[in-house]
Image: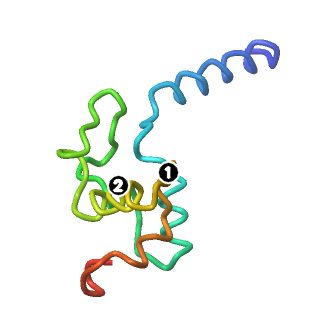
Amino acid sequence: MNLGRLAPAASIVLLCAKAVAPAEADPRLVKESKDAGMPAQNCQYCHVSKVPKKDTFKAADDLNDRGKWLVAEKDKRKSKEVKGDWLKEFPGGKEQK
């Protein structure tokens, strides 16, 4: 396969991958959480499902207590988006952070 055909094919693959990527589980939040010193390793730090999907996402079912707390904080702070560093304020013992 020559390079002229490879570049457009790679672009299509990347666009398709972005289209099916979970919208609710923003990888930025995992990074922000880690940067804040939290032991987040993946989306399950705040979500129940391993890879939350936008089309099937239901906050009541797909978020664990930490995720539900973050959504409540977003509303309380009247923020447009959840911030990973808020997890420093998550109530509970060290084992829950």
User: In the image, 86: left or right of 49?
Assistant: right
- Residue at 36 percent of width and 32 percent of height: 54
Q: Position of residue 97 (x, y in %)?
A: 33, 78
> Which amino acid lies under the numbered mark 1 shown in the image of this protein?
Glu
In which quarter of the view is residue 39 placed?
bottom left
Q: Where is residue 42 in the image (x, y as percent from the top left)?
A: 40, 58
Residue closest to the eye, 3 or 33: 33
Q: Position of residue 22 (x, y in %)?
A: 42, 37
Q: Cβ–Cβ below 8 Å for labels 2 and 1?
A: no
The colour scheme applied to this rendered structure is: rainbow
Residue closest to the eye, 8 or 16: 16
State the SS at label 1: loop
User: In the image, 88: left or right of 65?
Assistant: right
> Which amino acid lies under the numbered mark 2 shown in the image of this protein?
Val
Tag 1 residue? 81
- Residue 40: mark: none
| Vertical arrangement, residue 44 with respect to residue 23, above or below | below
In which quarter of the view is residue 66 placed?
bottom left
- Residue at 68 percent of width and 22 percent of height: 11
- Residue 71: mark: 2
State the SS at label 2: helix
Q: Where is residue 94 in the image (x, y as percent from the top left)?
A: 30, 87
